[in-house]
Image (tube, rainbow, N blue to C red):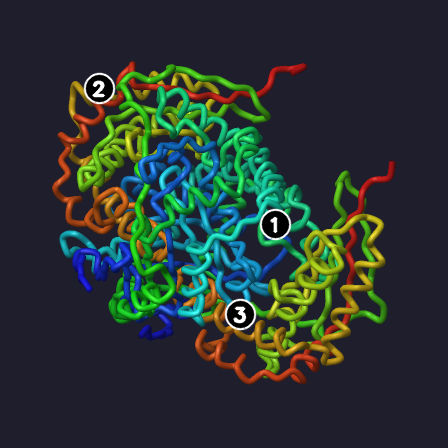
Amino acid sequence: MSQVTRRELFPGVWLRAVHTSKFKSSYLSITLLAPLDKKTAGANALIPEVLRRGTAVHPDMESLSAALDELYGGAIEPVVRKKGETQCVGFVSSFLDDAYALEGENILEPAAGLLCELLLKPCTEDGAFCSDYVAGEKANLIDRIRAQINDKRTYAVQRLTQEMCRYEAFGADKLGDEESVSAITPGDLWQRYQALLREARVEVYYCGSADPDRVAEALRVALEKLPVNEERVDPGCDVRVSAGPEPILVEEAMDVSQGKLALGFRTGGLTCWEEDYPALTMCNAIFGGTTLSKLFMNVREKLSLCYYASSMMEKMKGLVLVSSGIEFDKYQTAKDEILAQLKAIQDGQIETWELEGVRRTLIGGYLSTLDDQGRQEEFWLGQAAAGLDTTIEELAAQFETVTREQVAAAARQLVLDTIYFLKGKEG
Amino acid sequence: MEQLNFARVGETMYHEKLENGLNVFVFPKPEFQKGYAFFATNYGGMDMRFCLNGEWRNTPAGVAHYLEHKMFDTQEGNALQDLAANGASPNAFTSNDITGYYFDSTEKFEENLRILLSFVSVPWFTQESVDKERGIIGQEIGMIEDDPHWKCYMNLMKALFQRHPIRVSVAGSVESIARITPETLYACHKAFYDPANMVLCVAGPVDPEHICAVAREILPKQAGPIAAKDYGEKEQPRVAQPLIEERMEVSAPIFQLGWKGDAQVNGEARLRQELVGELALEVLLGNSSPLYARLYREGLINQEFGYSYESSFGCAFLAADGESRDPQAVRMAVAEEAARIGREGVDPSLWERVKKGVYGNRVRGLNSFEHLCVGQTQAFFAGYDFLRFAELFGSITREEAEELIAGWVTEERTALSVVRAREEGQ
């Protein structure tokens, strides 16, 4: 079985190592955890993309590609994620596990070396990032930001979050906004990069057959050039316990053929740090988190009120967000029905097949995470951002004992805060 | 059961041929939570003409795919829902060569396996349900026909091959599926869904003997006759037409380039050709080849560029696809690079590098149970074991890749398919 350990490599630089020989590959990621802030989000998101273009040693895609071939066709991807009010930027990578190298050579050490070279030794001109790379990746990032707007389903939830959390850091998007990304110069970006390297907490993740001591040593060597700082910042997360006295309604009109209705609930401070968190997770799964859920089975399938209807949970912020696609004139009916489904859960109207089906789905989902290196990495990064140490197996086990009454009690914590409605333009 | 060890990639495969002719392969994975089962027949979109019990029969294009859609119907209801209710994620696909049904689940694996084996082996079609499906499949065909990438690929097949049935879309056309009746479906099920023409491949925390016991219990006891297939006359090396163009809704011209190869007979020779073909592509135009870097710099290709070796029974080819403002220039550049390799040979350090890269990617791919089980099933139908690549790989030489490039990347074997944007007013 796999063994999970955690240790501090340097002050504020942590290694989570999953020691297992069940995979053919080793998974290695390095992530800088920065407080999510509208002002820095765009630049932070741009940094790994620019870094991935070339290093002082491997200055272009061609030489990087050759270096990866030498490491048995490894893959390194830049990535930006949002965990609560923490913006996580860095790289995820996958390499052939040492056990399968043809000449018995080590792959871990040179792989860790290349990964950290990307992070720490960028290709520069005039003491900053190469202007070509910055310009190219700015254009790519702006394309990605616009693509989010084109996908109205994502856009509606994003707008809901923005409006609902307009006075909270959580309102910012992980990619930043087009305006601030457009304004970034190579010099600005260089300063932001230096600040990140100096101040951000660093999470390193490894999953593979190497002994954790060896992994730690390989990373200590590879991260030698990282500035030493005793006071790297632990990002926090503000939890607003209650919603306002009345739900806020935000309406927008665009040239669309299908309406989007998104509802944002506050969980009254019920988050991943609370004892009742497993009950809240089950509550969300029964409400709209699975294909067995009330929103899917009743609102979509039985009543055909929505093209889609689902809910998701922001475990650190204590939010439950409902997303649905509706005919423009179904606004009131759909909203009433979504709230009626929640009311049913609050009243304990949960069929045994719903409760047990969702329990099995959640447990199966958590346990199958153990079969996938990338999903495990995602899980542990979430735990790191939340400062939690609970394992996948422990969480899965917690679902076994959640009762109907506990689910109903969690549901009663939910209060509607903001409604976002995207409708068509008249005429 | 027969036990095969592939030590180099750390895999053990159990194999048994049951009394009814079914070949069962099992990869025990005690450390994993999830189990995966793949049940497939050696029958795909290109198997339109066949002979059963001495009688030759021509069937419309799209029957294999139509069958795949209808197999989930059972006398009691729908197997898809039964599996989903058990926490399994089921699905199916039809390719040119095979039709496969699968699920994965962390719980109730055996119960799910029984459902899978049962619904695939027991057909249940009515006139009404078959007619209803025609509309659904018709919509699916309409959707893929609007997809420029699919169109570009199908056009390439028409340009490369004179008569091989790979020229025909797996889903068929609205006209061809209009001729499919419950009788057609029953006849094709009978011809190809016999255990003796099928493979069951399972990976997960399972006991191989137990998998065989379940298969013995659910499936027919005796092997039936298997239909003989006919793909027409052997293909000539020359392509059917060197260029095929079409206009659709695209923002930039997209292209598929194909180089027609000589198909291998079933057996390990097919695996060897696949490995040589993949390596040849890497040195000719792969991500770390000099040609790729040049085309990228000159703006003739972008990140959408991809390439692959493809083969089915009776046909083999290399393909490269992407977006380009000038697909003809890409074609010319590849021809020139092939000629240069012909003169100078492949750079030995590039060769060693791409060999490592291709090998590592293949091994990493084995993390996926789906990849492993589908791979073994297809390999078995083609006459070899999927994991044999690990042993064969080291013996592949630079000369073999050079020879393949010299033999295939020639004027008469090259076809180019382009989809351009519609002109103003069209």
Residue B121 location, quadrant: bottom left
Q: Chain of mark 3?
A: A
Describe the element under mark 2 as helix, strand or loop. Answer: helix
The residue marked by circle 1 belongs to what chain?
A
Residue lying at the far right in this picture: please name it: A427
Based on the displayed image, in which of its 4 quarters is residue B215 positioned?
Answer: bottom left
Front disc: 2 or 1: 2
SS type, badge 1: loop
* Discs 1 and 3 share one subunit: yes
CB under 8 Å between discs 2 and 1: no
Give the residue type that dot 2 points to.
Answer: Arg
- Above or below A6: residue A184: above
Number of other residues with Cα within 10 Å of mark 2, as a class: few under 14, some 14 to 19, many 20 or more = few
The residue located at (44%, 71%) in the rendering is B108
Is residue A387 something one can see in this rendering?
A: yes
| Viewer-side residue, B179 vs A199 | B179
The amino acid type found where label 3 is placed reads: Thr
In the figure, is residue B245 to the left or right of B311?
right
Q: Is residue A181 left or right of residue B45?
A: right
Residue A176 tag number: 1
Marks 2 and 1, how far apart at CA = 47 Å
Which residue is denoted by mark 2 in the rendering? B340
Q: Position of residue A178 (x, y in %)?
A: 64, 43
Distance between the Cα atoms at labels 1 and 3?
A: 34 Å
Q: Nearer the viewer, mark 3 or mark 2?
A: 3
Q: Position of residue B61 (x, y in %)?
A: 47, 32
User: Which part of the image, by quadrant, shows the C terminus of chain B?
Assistant: top right
State the residue lying farthest toward the front: B54
Question: Which residue type does callout 1 highlight?
Answer: Gly
Image x and y of residue B389, in percent:
20, 47
Q: Residue at x 35, y 75 (%)?
A: A5
Q: How many marks?
A: 3
